[in-house]
Amino acid sequence: MRYGDWKLLFIDQEEWFRGEQTALSTPYIINLKLDPFERFIEARGYDEWAENRSWILGQAGKGIAKFVETFKEHPLSQESMSVQVGSVSDMINSKAIGR
């Protein structure tokens, strides 16, 4: 998800195509102005840096909730083909059918 200069990655994928997708317990937080090549997540000290910027998750969460609300008016026409979306997919599907 992109939020201003920030990018949040909820799933890690090492290879660009056909790579295994691994759900992250907490999303990677990337400031695209400071790290345009998105390499800092592998650096020493990243975890502390990201923890100090975890406030962005609350701000981005509002955008995610707003997006999910659009499924009430425009429900999904088919299930997602991703097998790793997990609880987020369940949440979107439940909102789409009004459960």
Image: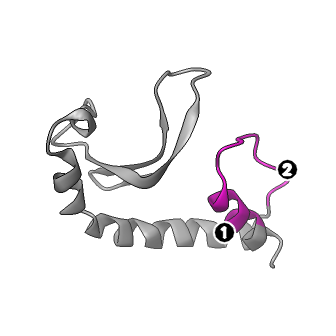
Task: State whether the magenta stretch is mostly helix, strand or loop.
Answer: loop
Q: Which residues are magenta?
A: 76-93
Q: Residue at x 55, y 72 (%)?
A: 66
| Camera-side residue of 63 and 27 | 27
Q: How many other residues sit within 10 Å of disc 2, few (<14), some (14-19) or many (≥20)? A: few
Question: Vertically, is 49 above or below 43?
Answer: below
The x and y percentages for residue 29 are 31, 51
Examine the rendering and report whether any part of residue 73 can be seen.
no
Residue 13 visible, this orientation: yes
Q: Position of residue 82 (x, y in %)?
A: 70, 41
Identify the image quadrant of residue 20. Answer: top right
Question: What residue type is disc 1 on?
Answer: Thr
- Find residue 93 and report its horizontal and vertical position in percent: 76, 64
Q: Residue at x 30, y 56 (%)?
A: 4
Secondary element at image label 2:
loop
Residue 78: assigned label? 2
Numbered marks: total? 2
